[in-house]
Amino acid sequence: MLFANKKMMLKSKDVEQLIKEKLASGRPKPFSILWLSYDKQRDTAGRVMKMDRAVLVSHYTKERIIKITPYGLNAITSVHYDLILYLNETPTT
């Protein structure tokens, strides 16, 4: 794990580094993520969402959006960087 001290907070560059990690086989390394939901079109927000064993599908730096899916499944979810609360049980800024 990148940080042994749980009191430390992950910055955006740390989050990006962790979600892009690969296993020795070259497959994406799973991570745990907790975030707030938000849907601009439906004007809904505020639900706390959690996904264990998530893997990165794609990453849009300019829009600050990542697309993730549960490991081994094809249920893609979009998450905005600013709405990520915890990554691997470590708080984010």
Image (cartoon, helix red, strand yellow):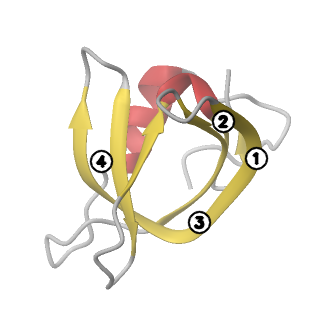
Q: Is disc 4 in contact with disc 3, using a CB cutoff of under 8 Å?
A: no
Using residue 86 as the reference point, say whether residue 55 is left or right of it: left
Determine which residue is flagged by label 2.
44
- The residues tagged by marks 4 and 2 sit, at their Cα atoms, a distance apart of 29 Å
Looking at the picture, does residue 25 appear above or below residue 45? below
Residue 49 position, x and y percent, is 68, 55
Residue 37 position, x and y percent, is 63, 42
Tell me the mark number nearer the camera, choosing from 1 and 4: 1
Q: Is disc 2 in contact with disc 1, using a CB cutoff of under 8 Å?
A: yes
Dot 2 alpha-carbon crowd within 10 angstroms: few under 14, some 14 to 19, many 20 or more: few
Nearest to N terminus: mark 4 or mark 3: 4
Q: Is disc 3 in contact with disc 1, using a CB cutoff of under 8 Å?
A: no
Determine which residue is flagged by label 1.
47
At horizontal 37% and vertical 66% (from top left) the residue drawn is 69
Quarter-of-image position of residue 73: bottom left
- The residues tagged by marks 4 and 3 sit, at their Cα atoms, a distance apart of 16 Å
Dot 1 alpha-carbon crowd within 10 angstroms: few under 14, some 14 to 19, many 20 or more: few
Nearest to N terminus: mark 1 or mark 4: 4
The foreground one among 89 and 64 is 64
Using residue 76 as the reference point, say whether residue 70 is left or right of it: right
Residue 27 position, x and y percent, is 19, 72
Q: Which kind of residue does numbered mark 4 sit on?
A: Lys
Residue 22 position, x and y percent, is 25, 62
- The residues tagged by marks 2 and 1 sit, at their Cα atoms, a distance apart of 9 Å
At horizontal 38% and vertical 78% (from top left) the residue drawn is 71
Determine which residue is flagged by label 4.
20
Looking at the picture, does residue 32 appear above or below residue 14? below
Quarter that holds the C terminus = top right
Which mark, residue 51?
Answer: 3
Inspect this view and state whether residue 89 appears: no
